[in-house]
Every structure is written in structure tokens, then in C-alpha cells.
Image (tube, helix red, strand yellow):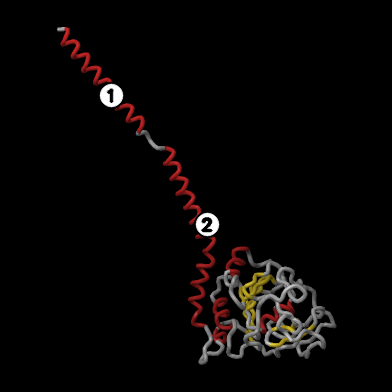
Amino acid sequence: MANGTTGKKGASGKAAVKAARGRSVVAKKGTPWGTIIGVVLVVCLLAGVITYYMVKSAPQREQKSRDEAAASFAPSASNPDPSKKIPGVITAKYEGSVHVLPTERVAYDHSPPFGGPHDGYWAACNGVVYPKAVRTENMVHTLEHGTVWIAYNPDQVNSDQVAQLSARVKGKPYTVMSPYPGLDKPISLQSWGHQLKLDKADDPRIDEFIAALRTNPNGVYPEIGASCDALGPGQFDPNNPPPFDPSKPGPDAKPMDYKGTTGATGEQGGMPSGAPGGQ
């Protein structure tokens, strides 16, 4: 009997030890909350990065689609000025290389102007989006070099529309954008001798106009191959450009048939005389 009892107690003790070991193993294999939280945080971070990228890159991705849709308006030898097929485009003939002094104004025949006498220093126009309105006489000079200038009325165009317009300009050569207070339409596009006024930033004619006229090599603008780079302080500083003058030009303003001011900056090969590389 004693041995039987001892045997039972021994078996019971072994079972208890085994159960205790089992509970210890279960405890050691508990839920790895630290790892799970870490993985969740990484996933959330990646999701945030992807969402941020998708939101920030949306204007550029949308613009790529617009550019592709407007590709058929690129100029060719058989179709030298495709802008003639764009509804709303108006045209005029202007003489190039007629310069005025930085202190002089021009009585332009359109607002915004798209040709005529202009300052000898051009505004930097290689994909520049100016946050404030810039002196008109400098902006007109950019058109002479083959640029498309997008002007907008800051009182009629909201921030989303500004972003849509900016996507057409930022980082793109021979393209420039600026506010134009008092504009009679929300948006106006200018190239030398061409203008198109519009109501909405998603209008496909914006992209057609740019495709047809920016650096169009078929005699559409006077100075093919001229620079659009920044000239710098003392000439035209894009970080501190001459401001827009909203007042009506006075009686001393130069007329559209003006032949140029003696001593005004001239150009040789797209560079103003006196500038580095100019004559």
C-alpha cells in the first residue's frame, strides 16, 4: 500500500511539474505586442508617405496627361502656327527689338500686352512662377524670346487653380507666370503676337496654346534662340523683380509705334549689351 501511495504521489508530482513547465512555455510565447506596434507604426508611416506623394504629385501627373492630349498642336512645317485652330486666340503684328529705359512706360494696346516696345532686360522666364506681379515692360520682352506668359487675376483665381496653372510652368523652359491685377478675365495667355483669355484653369486650350506657340520656330516670334535665363541684380533679378504698376500710363508713356529710346539696352544674340556675353 505504501509503495502504491508513493507511486501515485510521484506521478502526481511529475504531472504538476509538467503542467508548470507548460504554463511557463505559454507565458514565454505570449503576444509580441512590441513587434506588432512597431510593424503598425511602420505601415502607417509608409501609408502617410505614399498619400503625401500622391497628393503632392497629383498636379504634375494630371499635367502630363494634359500635355499628351495637346501634343497634336505642336507646330510643323506643314502647320506652322497651330494656334489658328484654337478658339478664342487673337493675333496682332508687332515689330521686335524696340527697347525703352527701365524708368519708362509703354502705352500698350492690350492688357495684358502681347507685343510692342519693351524694356531691354527680359524677365527670367525658364519655368519661373512669380508670386507677385512684375513690371509689364520686362514681361513683354520674354515673349520676344519665344516664351508663353500665363497671367491671372489674383482676385478671380483660387489657390487650386493657381496650382493647376503653376504645373504648366514650373521647371519648364520658356514659360513664365505671374499675377496681373485688374485683368478682365481670370486667366490670360500671351505669346508674341498671340493672346487667349479664359475663365478656368482646367481649360484644355491652355495646353494647346503652349504646345502651339512656345518656342515655335516658324517665324512666330522675333528672336529665335534668345536666352530666357536670369540676368541678375542690376539688370533683372528674379528674386527682386521690378514691380507691376497698376496705374494708367501717363502722357509721357511711349506709343505702340515707338522706335526705341536712345541709350536703352540693346541686344546681340539674345543678350543685352553690357550683360556678360553681350556687346
* SS of the residue under disc 1: helix
The amino acid type of the residue labelled 2 equals: Tyr
Residue 188 appears left or right of 256: left
Q: Dot 2 surroundings within 10 Å: few (below 14), some, or many (20 or more)?
A: few
Residue 60 appears left or right of 275: left
Residue lying furthest bottom in this view?
78
With respect to residue 14, does 208 lie above or below?
Answer: below
Counting residues from the start of the chain, the first of labels 2 and 1 encountered is 1
Residue 98 appears left or right of 55: right
Q: Position of residue 230 (x, y in %)?
A: 69, 75
Q: Position of residue 150 (x, y in %)?
A: 64, 75
Which mark, by number, is residue 19?
A: 1
Which quadrant: the N terminus?
A: top left
Which mark, by number, is residue 52?
A: 2
Q: Residue at x 52, y 91 (%)?
A: 77
The amino acid type of the residue labelled 1 equals: Ala
With respect to residue 112, does 38 lie above or below?
Answer: above
